[in-house]
Image: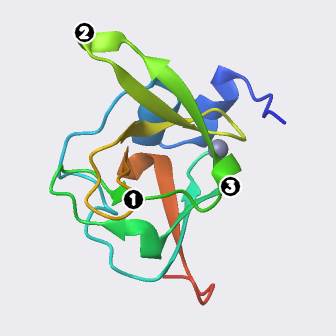
Amino acid sequence: MSDSKTDKQWQAELDPQTYRVCRLGETEAPFSGALLHNRQSGYYHCACCQSPLFYSDAKFDSGCGWPSFDRPIHKDAIRYIDDHSHGMERIEVRCQHCDAHLGHVFDDGPTDTSTRYCVNSAAMSFQNQDNKER
Ligand SMILES: [Zn+2]
């Protein structure tokens, strides 16, 4: 399953920051994201295709400057890609559905999953659990 939108369509549809992060693989400035300190209960969706990625009970404050989660909402929500850029060995995480760049995953998480998904705020949209508009 893949989304066949062209780069031009994404650019027209997404706000510039989301476009740069999700489609060009850029990283937002640390401590800048709107969802970093969000403590509400609800779902974090892909900002591009609205697929659910994380649930709020997996979110924790890692102090790294980006929203952090200890597990995805389900195994198939996320794609993993070896990232050798910037002279580092990292694992990039992308939306399984539309291939949007989300962030990276590390194995130094403080919770029992030992996993830390470090995700750009701009790559996600948040929906309250009660489904009401914020
Ligand atoms: Zn997506």
- Circles 3 and 1 in contact, beta carbons < 8 Å: no
Q: Between 71 and 38, which is closer to the camera in this rendering?
A: 71
Residue 103 at x, y = what percent? 41, 38
Classify the position of the N terminus by image quarter. top right
The amino acid pointed to by label 2 is Gly
Mark 3 secondary-structure assignment: loop
- Depth order, front residue of 9/128: 128
- The image's mark for residue 69 is 1
- Which residue is pictured at 57% across the width and 84% down the height? 129
Q: Position of residue 60 (x, y in %)?
A: 30, 67
Please give the name of the residue rendered at 32% of the width and 56% of the height, measured from the top-left corner: 67
Q: How far is mark 3 from mark 1, CA to CA?
A: 16 Å
On the question of residue 19 being in view, the answer is no
Q: Residue at 53% x, 24% y: name it.
A: 81
Mark 1 and mark 2: Cα distance apart in space: 25 Å
Examine the rendered structure and indicate whether residue 96 appears above or below residue 59: above
Does the numbered disc 3 mark a residue whose Cβ is under 8 Å from ligand 1?
yes
Which of pointers 3 and 1 lies earlier in the amino acid sequence? 3
Q: Quadrant of residue 73?
A: bottom right
Amino acid type, label 3: Ser
Q: Is ligand 1 closer than 8 angstroms to the Cβ of mark 1?
A: no
Q: Which residue is tagged 3?
A: 51
Q: Nearer the viewer, mark 3 or mark 1?
A: 1
Which residue was labeled with disc 2? 87
Circles 1 and 2, Cβ within 8 Å, touching? The answer is no
Q: Quadrant of ligand 1?
A: top right
Identify the residue shown where x is 27% and y is 46%. 108
Q: Earlier in the sequence, mark 3 or mark 2?
A: 3
Residue 120 coordinates in the image, percent (x, y): 37, 45
